[in-house]
Amino acid sequence: MTHKALARTAFATGIIALAVISLVFGDFADIWHSLSASAHVRDAMAYASAGLMLACGIGLLSNRTEARAASVLAPFFALLVLVIKLPPVLEGPLVEGNWQSMSEIVVLLTGAWVLSASRTREMRVAQLVFGLALIPLGLSHFVYVNLTAPLVPAWLPYHTGWAYFTGAAHLAAALGVILGILPQLAAAMEAAMLSVFTVLVWIPLIYAAPTSRGSWSEFTLSWAISGAAWVVAASFGERNLGTSDVR
């Protein structure tokens, strides 16, 4: 399999896992809880989004349906950002957690956006948005170091140091992608770091509490975000997507 195919598979399986967990627990990584609506409406939205993600995740696995599935996922995640994640940012722009929460969905958006892009310029915009989304993820490690450090595996020393280091790594990757300084390497290192987080942080927590809804949600969300990052990293090797592209 090519790098793009492997990245697409990682993203697709992450989206499928998110959908399965949403169906099992009746939610989508707690996102719909912030919706100003009745519990019945939130539940309906959660199950509907899970069904959509499941169908699109499966669609991403095939070359024939990849672009169509991605073209559905991208506006879906964009809608989540605009309706669910952006309002808290506008209401509390100085609350870093609001930006971090929005950036996680933006990363998923960029993964689908890249796979549905037909022009080089469109793909570059998606890559830049991805780079911008990494900034709040990095800053969160500094602002919420007291929450980040305990997530470092117990067998590693210097938990606070690792929290700061990984936060700085997020920011370095963001600069690399935005400024075009070894952007493919920057995005690949970011994807690798996110993948390591998924394995070293969330799998042990699931093992310790296998019925924990929160741990499963965070694990699958981290998996999908890692896959999206791999998709963006693979996209830096693509050129001349559309003959009508104006450069």
Image: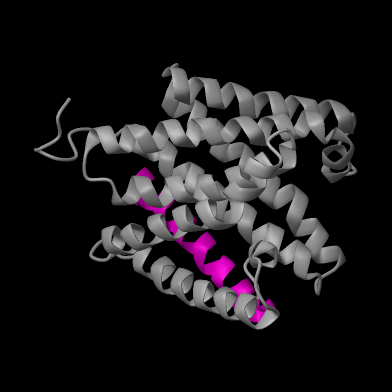
Residue 134 against residue 215 in the figure, above or below: above
Residue 161 against residue 45 in the figure, above or below: above
Chosen colour scheme: one colour
Q: Is residue 6 magenta?
A: yes
Residue 74 lies, in percent from the top left, at 39, 55
Left or right side of 211 for 108: left
The residue nearer to you, when weighing 97 against 173, is: 97
Range of residues picked out in magenta: 1-26
Q: Residue furthest left?
A: 243
The residue nearer to you, when weighing 26 against 157, is: 26
The residue nearer to you, when weighing 171 against 129, is: 129
Left or right side of 49 for 41: right
Residue 26 lies, in percent from the top left, at 66, 78
The image quadrant that residue 94 belongs to is top right
Q: Main secondary structure of the magenta part?
A: helix
Residue 2 in sight: no
Tally of numbered discs: 0
Residue 224 against residue 180 in the figure, above or below: below
Residue 207 lies, in percent from the top left, at 81, 65
Q: Identify which residue is drawn at 56% across, 75% down.
A: 45
Left or right side of 89 for 76: left
Q: Identify which residue is drawn at 51% across, 68% down.
A: 16
Residue 209 in sight: yes
- From the image, which quarter does the C terminus lie in? top left
Residue 197 lies, in percent from the top left, at 69, 45
The image quadrant that residue 143 belongs to is top right
Q: Identify which residue is drawn at 24% across, 34% down.
A: 120
